[in-house]
Amino acid sequence: MTDPLLRLVDLKTHFQTKGVGLFGEKKVLKAVDGVSFDIAQGEVLGLVGESGCGKSTVGRTLTHLEKTTSGQAFFEGREFLSMTPHKFRPLRREIQMIFQDPFASLNPRLKIEQTLGEPLFIHGLCKTWNEARSKIAATLERVGMDPKIMSRHPHEFSGGQRQRIGIARVMILQPKLVIADEAVSALDVSIQAQFLNLIKKLQRDSGMSMLFISHDLGVVRHISDRVAVMLAGKIVEIGDKHQIFEAPQHEYTRKLLNSIPRIAIGKEA
Amino acid sequence: MALLEVENLEIAVSTQRNLLPVVQGVSFTVDENETLGIVGESGCGKSLTSLAIMGLLGTSPVRITGGSIHFDGMNLLALSERERRAIMGNRMAMIFQEPMTSLNPVYRIGDQIVENLRQHQNLSHAAARDRSVELLSLVRIPDPSERIDSFPHQMSGGQRQRVMIAMALSCDPKLLIADEPTTALDVTVQKEVLDLMADLQSRMGTAIVLISHDLGVIAETCDKVAVMYRGKIAEAASTADLFAELLHPYTRGLLNSIPVVDRDVEWLEAIPGRVPTLEETLTGCAFQPRCELATELCACEAPQTTQFKPGHSVQCHFAGQDRS
Ligand SMILES: Nc1ncnc2c1ncn2[C@@H]1O[C@H](COP(=O)(O)OP(=O)(O)OP(=O)(O)O)[C@@H](O)[C@H]1O
Ligand SMILES: Nc1ncnc2c1ncn2[C@@H]1O[C@H](COP(=O)(O)OP(=O)(O)OP(=O)(O)O)[C@@H](O)[C@H]1O
Ligand SMILES: [Mg+2]
Ligand SMILES: [Mg+2]
């Protein structure tokens, strides 16, 4: 049997908090508390769950932005959470994260072409700026932005436009695994639809895998092969998307499905 | 007279060379106790419209070039800076689209809420702190008395958004502008936040402007809806009338592009193309290059706003028609 692209084994990421417990011991916030799952190559795993349950922390831990407390993660069979930054460097390109807060994740001082272009040089994907610019133009076009915006700065864009730039920054590197953290929640529905179609196509053509974190259950159903439901640092239910959406087992999953706002269209509304 | 009256609002961005219009001839009213939803594609001017109402365009290259905004009979565009400050955050409050743009990363969230409260209410520090803990628990932040000392980066995306909601609701505003207030929230917390807003409305008669691209949220919470496209209102009606008959091909396009939870579709029906940038000058209808109904007429002549039916207005030469 071949290794899955990504395998998490009992991942825990705890934070020290300022508070002190009843007996004077330091309190910890168990943001991620024993999470295990696999993502096969070419597979999209949707991750849903209550706000604050630890979804982003899973993503941030996998990209070395938070330190693991315990547990392991394997990329193509190799454990990578314990790697030194130097050893992890080649994997940085392969494992890319689209961040939840587009404003916080774009450097306000850099022009869009610098934001998108510099990683191309760092990872040796381009040699000249001419080459870089044509890649940037093609990628911007794919996320529905006019390539001419390259010479502008982030503050000149609306929330949804900034998010598309964040997506472009990841897609341009052609990673094997994308961790998309609420990547589409700032997008309007039509760009979202274009983007989801694009992802599906990219994913089929290139075999890219995704951990797709979102609270939009319609989007999750559309994009995912399997879905994991998280609550208070733990996965409470995981399975094929049809099973999750049509025969949810856990009470919290059922509560989620019941809270979705719906639209009634037409005269009978 | 409605509580908020926006009339023929024009906003433009100044570049080195010229002034580019971003919002053109936008008019709407919101009554006490009423919720107006604004939907529309990214970049169409929703946030700028709300910043204009809040008087927050300030010194940016973006400025109001025409029209009027009245709140409770006052001309907001004629207020002095001092008069404006007295109203903002007190009688008018706004929930911003991106929490990190309005939370200061170097201060603990508690200090920010306390300061905000004390600016507008006559409270002691201790009382303001107690009230802050209460506000955090209202928006369902767990362990509020501990989390009050967190820095913004120590909170999850949805928690940051809820901190901002708590701040906006804290002074019982008469007008609340909520710009994508629930985008980072899961549906169960979203429901609670929308309930909090509804509760504020029923206690204070608050007028609410809710900007959202989630048509489900709009359908469930708003009394009326304005659909914006590239700086203009493409279609406006009461929520019931709008969803009963979608007149503008753009509104239909938006609705068709939503993935639904109840069934699988292979490819979503995205509206082709993208919103033209500000630099791209257009003759005719701004939606025409992407529209399946477009004809010669649409390419040369911009449609005027027409009352298709009482209370249901639309800007389209072929309103209500299907492709055929
Ligand atoms: N640096 C940190 N220090 C302390 N606590 C943190 C830190 N980062 C996150 N947390 C806490 O860990 C928990 C999980 O946060 P996380 O951002 O992973 O949630 P999430 O599931 O992504 O939520 P959301 O849907 O709201 O984005 C939250 O209670 C959060 O406040
Ligand atoms: N400071 C600025 N300088 C130049 N252009 C700007 C500036 N701020 C906004 N714009 C432009 O004005 C237009 C409207 O922006 P606005 O933020 O109102 O969009 P929006 O409808 O809120 O979109 P979203 O749904 O993505 O938040 C966009 O095309 C944007 O690029
Ligand atoms: Mg998160
Ligand atoms: Mg906006």
Image: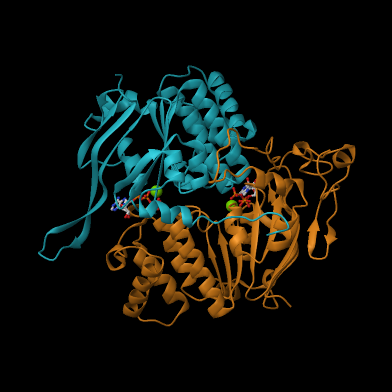
Chain colours: A cyan, B orange
Image quarter in which the N terminus of chain A is found: top left
Q: Is residue B74 above or below residue A214?
A: below
Residue B36 spot, x, y in % from top left: 65, 65
Judge whether residue B66 can be spotted in this image: no
Residue B95 spot, x, y in % from top left: 52, 62
Image quarter in which the C terminus of chain A is found: bottom right
Furthest residue toward left: A23
Q: Is residue A235 above or below residue B220?
A: above
Number of labels in the image equals 0
> For this view, does A41 lie left or right of residue B147?
right
> For this view, does B301 lie left or right of residue A1?
right
Residue at 76 percent across and 46 percent down: it is B249
Residue at 71 percent across and 75 percent down: it is B2
Q: Is residue B118 above or below residue A251?
A: below
Closer to the camera in the image, B273 or A233: A233
Furthest residue toward front: A247
Residue A212 spot, x, y in % from top left: 43, 39
Residue at 28 percent across and 68 percent down: it is B145
Residue B79 spot, x, y in % from top left: 65, 73
Furthest residue toward top: A127
Q: Quadrant of residue B53?
A: bottom right
Closer to the camera in the image, B304 or A201: A201
Judge whether residue A167 can be spotted in this image: yes
Closer to the camera in the image, A250 or A22: A250
Q: Is residue B97 above or below residue A204?
A: below
Closer to the camera in the image, A30 or B2: A30
